[in-house]
Amino acid sequence: MKKDSYSILEANTTYLVMALVLMTAGAYVQERSFESGIFITEYVFVLLPVLFVGLRGKIDMKKALRLRGIRLKQAVIIVLIAAALIPTVAFANTLTIYLLSLQNKVIVPPIPTASTTGELGLYFFLIAISAGICEEFFFRGMMLNAFEKGINRKWGVIISAVLFGVFHFNMQNLLGPIVLGLMFGYIVQLTDSIFAGVLAHTANNGIAVLAGYLGSVTAENAESIEVTSAQLNDSSALLGSLAVLLVMAAVLWVVILKLLKILRKDTNTFEENSEFRLRGVDYLVVSKYNGSVTAVKREDMTPAELRETFTYTVKELRRLNAVGAEKLWNDSAKAYSVKHMLLPWLGVAAIYLWYVHMHLSYAG
């Protein structure tokens, strides 16, 4: 019989091994060739372990990885959320850079940017599509599944997001990915589809690739790098950038919250035994057939066979703005084995602290 989830021990052990491989073999193949190195890193070092552990552990990966589609309307909303989140991510990373700049510890990373349409297509495939698929299957697939089943849904999102940030092994790019991980995990749970995370991740990285390309064709690379280096070590300039990004992020969060509200309404499928709220009244779905939903009032305490039933179509419920009465993160935490988390995490923490030491020593 197949299992419906990865275990915390399986996920953590895989993450530790992956961290070791990325810091050694991953760094080696990317140094030899950025393009082939990224391809090997994503598909061999990140995606393959998810499939290998799933097959070896006899896990129902269709269920564990949430392999179900999303509708066009949902896809458009998700892309808009990913785009609106960019100033928040930029603020989070700029905050870290500002703190490092106070000690002159900022390093300008050599980020390849496309300078031709051919390179744009290649980098979009490698950095946006490939990373979107492989990293989402690992973090919002294996990791999220293991922790939400082993603890609860809220901690599943939080832990997988933090580990996603650490995965980048870049002090200056830690907080931003954590913010993205929180949002990606939430919309994956909301839609119950890994492809929501894949699309959001691809959109976020794709915008970065496109921005890099547009920058490379409108400015000379040497001058651009020199200016960027000076700005990243100028604390006063960074404070100005933080202020601008904070305002932009605050304004766009109004948009993000509205988009999430629309997405929550659109993803409610009104399955049997689920609850929804309509005009201030909570209902329990007792059956669903061919798009027709039969429900009873939650407060109705009469015997089941005597309860008054109400029948709606799913389209009608959405038109009437019926929303799920149950909160996504209201499930209680389960007991779990600390040792299954502690040892792998100690290993990952040691690797990350070593990286931090190397960063600060190099920058100094």
Image: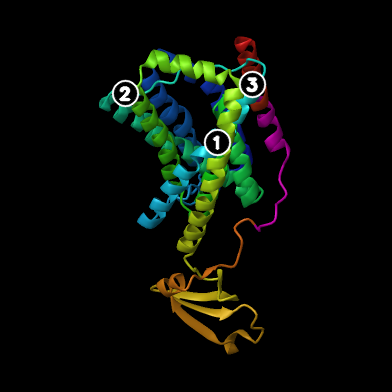
| Secondary structure at numbered mark 3 | helix
Q: Nearer the viewer, residue 86 or 151?
A: 86
Q: Is residue 346 magenta?
A: yes
Q: Residue sitting at 73 percent across and 39 percent down?
A: 338
Q: State the extent of the magenta-drawn residues as a range.
A: 330-347
- Disc 3: CA contacts within 10 A as few (<14), some (14-19) or many (>=20): many
Q: Nearer the viewer, residue 258 or 22?
A: 258
Q: Quadrant of the C terminus?
A: top right
- Disc 2: CA contacts within 10 A as few (<14), some (14-19) or many (>=20): few
Q: Is residue 129 above or below residue 68?
A: above
Q: Residue sitting at 53 percent across and 41 percent down?
A: 248
Q: Amino acid at mark 1?
A: Val
Residue carrying label 3: 100
Q: Position of residue 172 (x, y in %)?
A: 58, 25
How far apart are the two marked residues, 2 and 3, measured between alpha carbons? 30 Å
Q: Residue sitting at 61 percent across and 18 percent down?
A: 355
The mark nearer the N terminus, 1 or 3, is 3
Residue carrying label 1: 244
Residue 108 seen in render: no
Q: Amino acid at mark 3?
A: Leu
Q: Nearer the viewer, residue 123 or 13?
A: 123
Relative to 151, 58 lies left or right? left
Q: Nearer the viewer, residue 309 or 46?
A: 309
Q: Position of residue 223 (x, y in %)?
A: 41, 14
Q: Is residue 279 magenta?
A: no
